Structure formats: structure tokens, C-alpha cells
Amino acid sequence: MGKEQGKIGYDNVPRVILEDALAGYWDWDIENSVEYLSPRFKSMFGYEEHELPDTPDAWQQLIFPEDLQMVLDNFDQHVKSQGKIPHKGEVRYKHKDGSTVWVSFSGRVVEWDALGNPRRMIGCHIDITAQKRLEQQLKTSEKRFKEAFEHSTIGMVLVSTEGKLLKVNRNLCQIFGYTEEELLTKTFQELTYPDDLEADLSLFNSLIEGHIPHYQMEKRYFHKSGKIIWANLSVSIVRDQDGQPIHFVSQVEDITQRKKAQGKLERTLELAKNQNNRLMNFAHIVTHNLRSNTGNLAMMLDFYEKEEDASVKEELLKHLKQISGSFTETVAHLTEVVDTQTKANKHLKRIKLHKVIEKTKASLSADILRLNAEVVNNVPPAVSVRYNPAYLDSIIINFLTNALKYSSPERSPIITFKLKERMAFYVLSITDNGLGMDLKKVGGKLFGLYKTFHKNQDAKGVGLFITRNQIETMGGKIKVDSTPGEGTTFYIYIPKKVNPTMNA
């Protein structure tokens, strides 16, 4: 066939290679304008061997016109450079069924005449249609991802395995308050609120090691302004063909307003719970004390009316006066508790704690002297709080009075006032070396109405109940540590920005 016109070069190439090769082989006799096209070359475009003639015109009729010119220009460059510029590229052909076939071609002039003109050229075509489709799919996928990334309604970021931000979208910049250039200089470790970093890093490492496919968590970040942002973070990982991590895709949804609303709801529920507890205490007064007093009063009146002996009636009158006094005292306590809730927002002033403690020491100087007590005021004189003066006086008097009242008979009382700062609170601690309490036994009863825990005839079980209500009504809280026989420390949390709960 190599000696037949139109079949040049065939005798130099084994038939099995030409027929089985994935590449379409061609051999072009340029001088005679004859070109051998292998069976694989023809079948690549859907033709049987006899359906496509062995001529340059055959393949030139199939190639896309705009690609043909590129091939011819490339051939001219190859010839002019005497083969130094390679003849290769990617072009499109029309398949017999009308579809498009992408081809990677390469060729070389292998024979030249004495004048340097090309005589013979050989080459091959490789079908890369599947590869091109895949590339197109990848481009489409990348385009869609880019569009989704850029225009997402939540913040999106690509993060390296070291935590460096590789690419961020506009929404993320808005969430953190940085420009894109500023944000790309940060790591997620820098942006993360310290208390949330350990949990995030643990999940981050588990993702790298392949223990989990992705993770989601609520965490806090720092805004450029320094304020705290709450976000819902979702993280997935992108790996290479060998399974090695390339980068992470993170979605950051700003939920700061949701968390604020949730916090407000929780505070409202807590307030409702506290109010309910107070109502239960009021119910306790009504159902027990008032009913008991009114029942006893009615019974005594009945006895008094039926009794004829003057001396007995006089004795019954004393009991009636006692019941009446107890009744009056109970009503007074109830009124005081109600006042705690209704007058919280009145007369808020800037008050120096040190001065209030000193004033209370002076008012209780007789008891302090009588008990040989030492009251240490370590509260800085310059610190002031915005509070209801009547409440603050009541709180300090109550705790100092109790510390003196429940002092140990075995030693002189030592009562120490200290102040520390805790985020949004001043924490006033009042420590004594008195009788102490077993908090496991006392439990949640310590601040209950009419609850007493020492055999002191002056104890009414009202002071701590009202004091706690005053503190909580001003937006604070109270904690206690105590050891029987050693003493007690009360911790009063005073908000730096007071917002009475009755106005919340």
C-alpha cells in the first residue's frame, strides 16, 4: 500500500499499530498533495475507512473554518522556522452525526528538499472531546461556585490548612467590618473570641484528620470595632486526588441579632420565673400567715364574746393585741416586698460604695463596740455605682447587721468588704468569721421568706428575702459561700449599667 498512490508510508508502519492506536495517524506527501489517513483517524469522526478519501481536502472539509485558518497559520510558522516552531494545537471537527469533536493535533515535517521546502509531514490526532467536556463542566462549576461565593447572602471564606484566609466574599467583609484587603491579612484564630477558639480548633483538626466530613457550631468573633459578633459557622474540606487537604470552605452566618433576641427572651423568662417565685412567696404569706392570724383573731374574738369572767377576758384581750400586732407586722412585710418591686427605678443616683459602708459602720457603732468587732472596708474610695440609695443602704445594713448578729461566741467578729470587677459587674464581697451555714442543708431556702437557720430570737427570715429582691430588681445577683463554724462570704453583683427589671 506504501507503493500505491494515496497510501504512502503505510509499509513503514505496522498495521496493528495503526488499527489499534487511540491516536489517528496521518502521513502527508506534500509534493503530490496525497495524505494517508489511518482508520482510527477516520473513525474518530464517525466514518468508515472507505467513506473518507485520503486527501488533505477530506479533513479540511470537516474542521471548523475558524480553526482551519489557525492550523494553516501554524503550519506556515513551522515551515518557515524549519521545524523549530512545533506544529500542534487544539481544534474542532464536525462528526458525521453533527456533533463536535475536539482534537489535539501534532505533526512534524520529516523530509525537506534541497531548497528547504517541505516534502513529507507526519503527525497524529487525539480525541480530547471528553477532556474538553470535563473542562467545560469544571469551568461551569467554578463559575457557579464563584457566583454563589460572591453573591451569597451569608459570609463565605476559603481558609488554608494553617488558618489563613485565602478568599472572602463581600458579605463576610460587611460582617467583620474590614475591607477585603484587610481581612485577607487575618487568620480565623485572630478573629475568634478566645473562649470559643479551643472548640473550633478541635473540630478543625478532626476535619483535617478525616474523622468528620464537616462541622457546624455557634461561635463568637471580634468585629473590627472590637464588638462581639455571634455567628453560625459551617465548615467543609476540599481535598486533592490523593486525599490531602487543600483548603476549607467556611460559611459564616451573622446571628448576633438572633442571639440578642434570644438573650432578651431568656431574661424575660427569668424575670417571669422570679416574679412567679415572688408570687408564690406572697401566696405563702396569705395562705399561712394571714389566714393563721385571721383565724386566730376570729377564734379569740369568739372566746372573748362568750367569756363572762372579767379577768379571763383581760387575758384574752392581751392575746388579741398580740395577734393584731403579728397581723400588722405580716402586712408591713408584704408591703415592703411590694415596694421593692414598684420603686426600683426611682431616685437612681451615683453613689460611692466606700462612703455607704463607712456610714453604715457609724450607725452600727454601738453593736460593733459591744461585740469588739472589726469591720474592714477595702472598697476603693473612688469607685461609684448608679443605684437606688435606699436600696444600697438597706443592702449594706442588712448584711453587716447579720454578720454581727450571727457572729461566733468563740471569737471577735471580723467583717471585710472588698470589691472586684467582673465584665459588666462590680462584685462586692462581704466576708465574716461567724457561725457559717451548711449550704447543702440550707439549699435554695436561704433567701426564702420567713426562713431562719440559727436559733436567734431576733431572726424574722425577712431581711435576706427582701435584700435579694432589691439586688435582683436592680439587675444584679447574689451568691454565697459558707462553712459551718468558720464563716460566710456573700457576693453582691452590682451592674455597671443598672437597668431595673421592672422597666425591662
Image: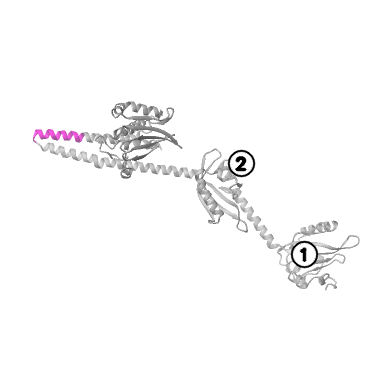
> Which of 298 and 491 lies nearest the eye of the viewer?
491
**Among the 4 quarters of the image, the one containing residue 401:** top left
Percent x, y for residue 12?
Answer: 82, 70
Percent x, y for residue 98?
Answer: 71, 65
C-alpha separation, residue under disc 1 versus residue under disc 2 = 52 Å
Judge left or right: residue 22 versus residue 449: right
Say which element carries label 1.
strand
**Residue type highlighted by circle 1:** Cys
Percent x, y for residue 14?
Answer: 78, 72
Colouring rule applied to residues? one colour
Q: In this figure, which residue is indicated by the disc labeled 2?
A: 182
Say the numbered circle drawn on residue 124: 1
Task: Reply yes or no: does residue 246 show up in magenta.
Answer: no
User: Majority secondary structure of the magenta segment?
Assistant: helix
**Residue 168 visible within the image:** no
Q: Within 10 Å of the Cα at label 1, are there few (<14), some (14-19), or many (20+) other Cα atoms? A: many
Looking at this rendering, what residue extends furthest in the front direction?
410
> Which of 48 and 395 lies nearest the eye of the viewer?
395
**Residue type highlighted by circle 2:** Glu
Magenta segment boundaries in residue numbering: 308-324
Where 218 falls versus 23 (above or below)? above
Query: Which quarter shows the N terminus?
Result: bottom right
Judge left or right: residue 117 versus residue 18: right
Task: Of the two numbered discs 1 and 2 on the same chain, state the one appearing first in sequence.
Answer: 1
**Among the 4 quarters of the image, the one containing residue 326:** top left
Say which element carries label 2.
helix
